[in-house]
Image (cartoon, rainbow, N blue to C red):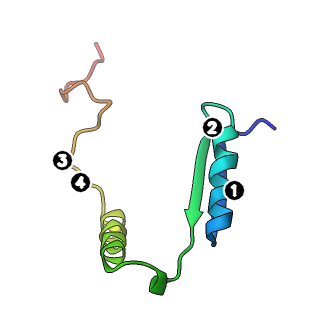
Amino acid sequence: MDLSSVFVQVRHEEELKEAIETAMGWKRGCLRFIEVIVHKDDTSKELLEWGSGVCSANSRAPNPQQKSSHSSGNNESNSP
């Protein structure tokens, strides 16, 4: 099977162990996404706070002043 990325959802510890073991066997260069679905009562307060912060950061618009890692550092055009 020639895949460039694989996505797996798990809900239990045994499923997670199996997903990690399987992911370690996939070819190099293949992206592996394992989404762990956990009930909020099964998580710590710190994890819930961290997740809330990640959610907030991901929902913000990008900062237009932030320079891309691909830019050469100047705003001049390369055209003749």
Indicate left or right for 60 with 7 as reference. left
Indicate left or right for 39 with 70 as reference. right
Quickly name the residue at label 1: 18
For the residue marked with disc 1, what is the amino acid?
A: Glu
As measured in the structure, the alpha-carbon distance from the residue carrying label 4 to the one carrying label 1 is 39 Å
As measured in the structure, the alpha-carbon distance from the residue carrying label 4 to the one carrying label 2 is 30 Å
Q: What kind of element bears circle 4?
A: loop
Quickly name the residue at label 2: 30
Task: Point out residue 7 in the picture as x, y percentages from the top left corner.
Answer: 65, 55
Task: Point out residue 15 in the picture as x, y percentages from the top left corner.
Answer: 68, 64
How many C-alpha atoms fall within 10 Å of the one at disc 1: few (<14), some, or many (≥20)?
A: few
First reached walking from the N terminus: tag 1 or tag 2? 1
For the residue marked with disc 3, what is the amino acid?
A: Gln
First reached walking from the N terminus: tag 3 or tag 2? 2
How many C-alpha atoms fall within 10 Å of the one at disc 2: few (<14), some, or many (≥20)?
A: few
Taking the image as drawn, is residue 3 in sight? yes
Q: What kind of element bears circle 2?
A: loop
For the residue marked with disc 2, what is the amino acid?
A: Cys
Residue in the image at 81% along x and 38% along y: 1
Whether the residues at callouts 4 and 1 have beta carbons within 8 Å, the answer is no
Q: What kind of element bears circle 1?
A: helix
How many labels were placed on the picture?
4
Taking the image as drawn, is residue 4 in sight? no
Quickly name the residue at label 3: 65
